[in-house]
Image: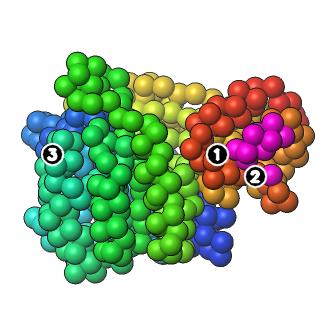
Amino acid sequence: MDSRIRVGHAEASGPQPGGPDTGPTGLSLYVHIPFCETKCHYCDFNTYAGIEALIPGYLTALETEIRFWGDRLDRPAVSTIFFGGGTPSYVPIEGIEAICAAIFEAFDVSEGAEVTLESNPGDCSKRDLTRYLGAGINRLSIGVQSLDDGLLKSLSRRHDSATAIGAYRSARDAGFDNINLDLMFGLSAQTVDQWRDTLDQTVALGPEHLSLYALTLEPETPLDAMVKSGEVEEPDPDLAADMYLYAETALGDAGFDHYEISNWSTPGLESRHNLAYWLNAPYLGVGPGAHSYLYGPAGGRYGAAGSWSERRFAALRSPRRYVDLLGGALPDGDPVDALSSAGLLDSVEPVTPATELADTMMMGMRLSRGIRSDEFRARFGLELHDAFGPLIDELSGMGLLVDDKPGIRLSEDGHLLGNEVFERFVTASADVELPGS
C-alpha cells in the first residue's frame, strides 16, 4: 500500500473575494529558524543565542527534512510559506536562498503563493533585501515592537526607533509591497500616550498589515523573574485593555480591517498563512520544535474502515539533536512514523472528531468573521446551534457574542475576554455528539 500522506494537489490561488472567508487551498508550510543574536527576556519560544557555529549544519539538515517531506507527500501543492523563529533574517542570506530553492524543488509552490520572512530591524540594514525577493519571498514581517527608545531598551531589543523606521523604508525601497509590522502593548511602565505615539507613527508609514500583541509574562523567562523580584513593574491588564481599544478605533479610522483578535490588514492582504491555523486547515512545520497538522494516510480524512486519521505532531526541540539525527538515513513507510522512530518527533497525537471540533471553535472564534453556520455544517454534519445552542444563548446574553444568520462571532466586548469565551467552547465540545463518532 502507498504510505504517502495525501494532502491534495489542487491549484492554490491568491486572495479570494471576502478575504478571510477563504484560507489557503494548498498546504501551508512553516520553516523554523531557531537562531537569534540575543534572546529577548520576555521570549519563551524555541530559540537560541550563541550557537551560530551550528548554522551551516542546521541549514543542511533543514534541506534534508524538506526533501523528505516533498518526496513522502508526493510533491503537494503549497500555497503559503512562513519563515519564523527565532530570527530568520539573522541567518546569512545565501542560507535563506538555499532553503527557498529546496522548497520550490520539493513542493509544488503555487503561483502567487504568499511567502513570508520574519526579520529583525537591525538585520534589514545589513542585507540586500532584493535577494529575498529574488529567492521568492514576497512578504516581510518586521519585529518593530515599539517606536519608543526607552521601551525598546527595557525589552532588551537590539534596535532603536530610527533603525526600525529605516528597516521599513529599506524594505519598501527593495520592492516589498506587502509588509507586516509587529508591535507590543501592555508593557511594564508603558503609558497610553507612548502607545498612541507608536501606533500613530506606524500607521503613518503605511504598512499593509499590523500584528499587535499584549505582553504576556511567560513562566521561567528572565522578565517573569524580574517582575517577581520587584525589579520590573508588573504589566497592568486594565491599561492594556485601554491600549487595545485605542488601537481598534485608530486602525479602523485609518482603513485597516480588524480581521483577527491581534491582526489588522488593508483589505485583501490578510496573512494567508495564519488563516490556515485559524481555519484549522492542514499545515506542515519543518525544523526543531515545529508543529504540524496533516490528514492521512491513503487519500482522505479517514483511514482504513473509516477510522479517524488526522494527526498533529511536534518535532524535537533541540537544534543540535535535530542536526545529528537528520545526518542519518530515515526509515521507509509512513512519514510521521518514520520521523517518530528516528527520534525526531517529541509527540504524535491522533485528532479525534471531538478534538477537531474543539480546535475549530477555539481558533475560528479568533477571526472577526467567527464561525460560519454553513461551514460548520459541512465540516461536522451538525447544525451549529444543535451543538452549542445553550452556550451561544448564554454568551450572547452576556454581550460577548453576536449570533446572526451567517453564524457566531465575538462582540467588541468579547474581544477583551476572548480567552474565556474560547475556553467555554473547548469545554462544551467534549459533550457534543457528532454524527458517526
Residue 430 shown left or right of residue 244 in the figure: right
Q: Position of residue 155 (x, y in %)?
A: 21, 42
Task: Give the Cα distance between marks 1 and 2.
Answer: 9 Å
Name the residue carrying label 1: 414
| Residue at 54 percent of width and 51 percent of height | 261
| Residue at 21 percent of width and 55 percent of height | 148
Q: Secondary structure at mark 3?
A: helix
Label of residue 434 in the image? none
Which of the two discs, 3 and 2, labels the residue nearer the N terminus? 3
Quadrant in the rendering for residue 105: bottom left
Amino acid type shown at disc 1: Gly
Residue stretch in magenta: 392-403
Residue 117 shown left or right of residue 260 in the figure: left
Any magenta on residue 93?
Answer: no
Q: Position of residue 47 (x, y in %)?
A: 26, 37
Any magenta on residue 397?
Answer: yes
| Residue at 66 percent of width and 64 percent of height | 21
Residue 359 shown left or right of residue 90 in the figure: right
Q: Is residue 50 visible?
A: yes
Q: Is disc 1 in contact with disc 3, using a CB cutoff of under 8 Å?
A: no
Name the residue carrying label 3: 153
Q: Nearer the viewer, residue 198 or 183?
A: 198
Label of residue 402 in the image? 2
